[in-house]
Amino acid sequence: MDPTIRSQFATTEKFAYLNSAAIAPPPKAAIAAVLSQLEDAAVYAGLRFGAWVDTKKRCRALMAHILGVRDEQIAFMRNTSDGFSTIANGIKWASGENIVSFADEFPANFYAWRNVRDRHGVELRLAPERDGRIDLDELIGLIDSNTRLVTLSSVQFASGFRSDLARVAEAAHKVDALFCVDLIQGLGAHAYDLPALGVDAACGASHKWLCAPEGIGYIYLSDRAHERISPTLVGWISMEDAWDFADREQDYKPNALAWETGTGPSALFYGLEASLKLLIEADLAKVETYLDDLSNYLCEKIASKDYEIVSSRENGERSAIVCIRHKGGLTPNEIAARLEEENVLVSPRLDRIRIAPHFFNNKEDIDRLADALM
């Protein structure tokens, strides 16, 4: 990648930061943008509210652009969990229906559906992990005529497994089920065209591969999903004319914007805009290719060490996340702590170490990791 990208990330001055699947560092441009809004508020307060709203609108347009959707199909929330919860709560469930998912999804894409199971008598069917993979034949085999929704991460947080979303969407649509996707471990490291993939709804947040400040979530609702899901977490911004304070019986906005309740974190949207612009200028397709090469280099370096690679490295299944397990019995927490002593940052996840380089990393960071691995 362009070396000027690396210079945008202060963490690279001290660390081999290989933990963007947890929290990615925001670039200097995003920090400056956040501060500019706070300084603006300190002087002008509410006088500049319109400019803050315009920034949020630009963020919506940028998000829509990188997802291949219309602006009005994107709504902002607090985080990924809020997105899944508002989708789950907005569907009229019936006893005897089922939801199909993966057993080791990140909890944000589990508890909303467990709540549906417990409250509405809906069955939650979960495919297990198989050697660091999801057997999509097995998962699709759980789908039947009573399946109301299929939900899956684009990239799995604890293995890096990347699912064939189009294939799962096709299976879901055959029984008229909605297909919902957790994008948080994919978007920013990979490019997506959600309509082309057949995704009906998607959720994610700002603080991982988008390299933006923590505190902004988003949902995407296709027209098909919008017809079947009602807004449940609502407020004055949800209304068709939010500034008409007298009409208390007006309709909701006729699109995903009905899912936005009230004013949001204006300063964070300034940061999100700067981070999205940096990723778009870098070209997400090029970022994906770069990270594929970098993760392959990582696997080559690991091959000489006393570790096994848990993550699938097959075409179409691999991602920027590489998970490894020590053959001699060292625990993930022990390994992560020792690496931190060498200023190499990774995450322990389940029984493995998760390594997640981003577009600001380089081969020297991977070499530092390999040298530090015991």
Image: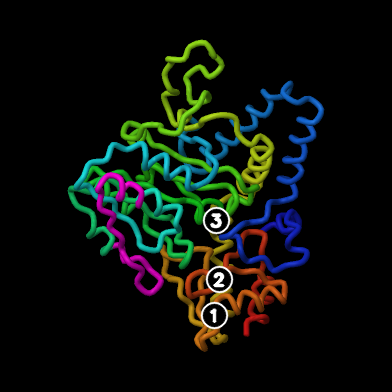
Observer-nearest residue: 25 or 112? 112
Q: Is residue 88 left or right of residue 5?
A: left
Q: Indicate which disc residue 189 carries.
A: 3
Q: Position of residue 152 (x, y in %)?
A: 38, 54
Badge 3: how crowded within 10 Å, few (<14), some, or many (20+)? many
Assign a secondary structure to mark 1: loop
Q: Label 2 vs label 3: CA separation?
A: 20 Å
At 46% from the left and 67% from the top, the residue drawn is: 159
Q: Nearer the viewer, residue 191 or 31?
A: 31
Q: Nearer the viewer, residue 184 or 215?
A: 215
Q: Is residue 330 magenta?
A: no
Where, by quadrant of the figure, is residue 333 drawn? bottom right
Q: Amino acid at mark 2?
A: Pro
Q: Which residue is mark 2?
A: 348
Q: Residue at x 28, y 36 (%)?
A: 92
Q: For residue 344, what is the image quadrant?
A: bottom right
Mark 1 = which residue? 331
Give the secondary structure at mark 3. loop
Is 267 placed above or below 275 here? above
Q: Which residues are magenta?
A: 114-136
The tag earlier along the polypeptide, 1 or 2, is 1
Judge by depth and name the residue closer to the eye, 160 or 77. Answer: 77
Task: Tell me the distance, in whole angstroms, between the alpha carbons under discs 1 and 2.
Answer: 9 Å
Residue 86 in the image, given as x and y percentages of width and height? 42, 39
Q: Quadrant of the C terminus?
A: bottom right
Residue type marked 1: Thr
Q: Can you say whether 314 is above or below 371 in the image?
A: above
